[in-house]
Amino acid sequence: MDENKLRFGVGVLILSSIGIGVILVFLFGAFPAVLNRQYTLDVKFDSAEGIGLNTPVVRDGVKVGRVETIKLVPEGGVLVSLAMDSDKPITRRYVPKIGAGSLVTGESELKFVLADQEILNQKFEADPELIATEYADGDFLDNGEKTKGIFDMEDDLQETIETINRAGKSVDELASNI
């Protein structure tokens, strides 16, 4: 009789462990598409440096999706597939950019930023009404950009340091003349 109780207890423990495991998987987002309705956007970038699978996609600081896949394009660049949340639509006024997310970890973030109106007018010259339309499932964007990182700004930083140095020398000369 005791052996049957032990077997029953082990069975209950195993079943409850499996149940808790499934609940935790859903809570921590291993199956995000199951709980959220999503659509896919494909964006071509010159480089996907710093982003990876499941990198959050944000607009105005709000998470609106995640990176689903990253594929190399034979002619150069990368194709990044984004799983976007259907309940947070984005209009074509916003363009995707990869920017520096953290200087400490080196991770980047993928965000949709409001595009310059002149650029939008040039891009949608044939049909300006498209600017206000929302992205839809399967859309392809060939205009992904990478914002300047700290290392991309090396020349600008060097020029700024030289300007500060010249200003310091001018102040030193002025002080000597006085």
Image (spheres, rainbow, N blue to C red):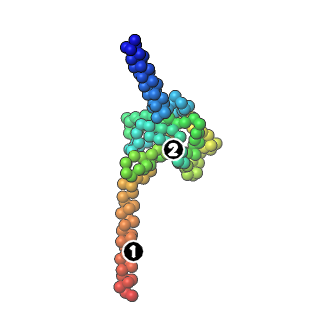
Instruction: Look at mark 2 in the image and give the residue it sits on.
Output: 58
Calculate the distance from the C-alpha at mark 2 to the C-alpha at mark 1.
Answer: 41 Å
Can residue 16 be seen here? The reply is: yes
Residue sitting nearer the eye, 68 or 76: 68
Residue 76 to residue 105: above or below:
above
Query: Looking at the image, which residue sits at the far front?
Result: 1
Q: Secondary structure at mark 2?
A: strand
Q: Residue at x 55, y 51 (%)?
A: 116
**What type is the residue that disc 2 sits on?**
Val
Residue 11, how many percent across, how many down? 41, 18
Give the crowd class for mark 2: few <14, some 14-19, many >=20 residues within 10 Å: some
Q: Secondary structure at mark 1?
A: helix
Q: Is 71 on the left-hand or right-hand side of 39?
A: left
Q: Residue at x 36, y 58 (%)?
A: 154
Can residue 42 be seen here? The reply is: no
Instruction: Look at mark 1 in the image and give the residue it sits on.
Output: 167
**What type is the residue that disc 1 sits on?**
Ala
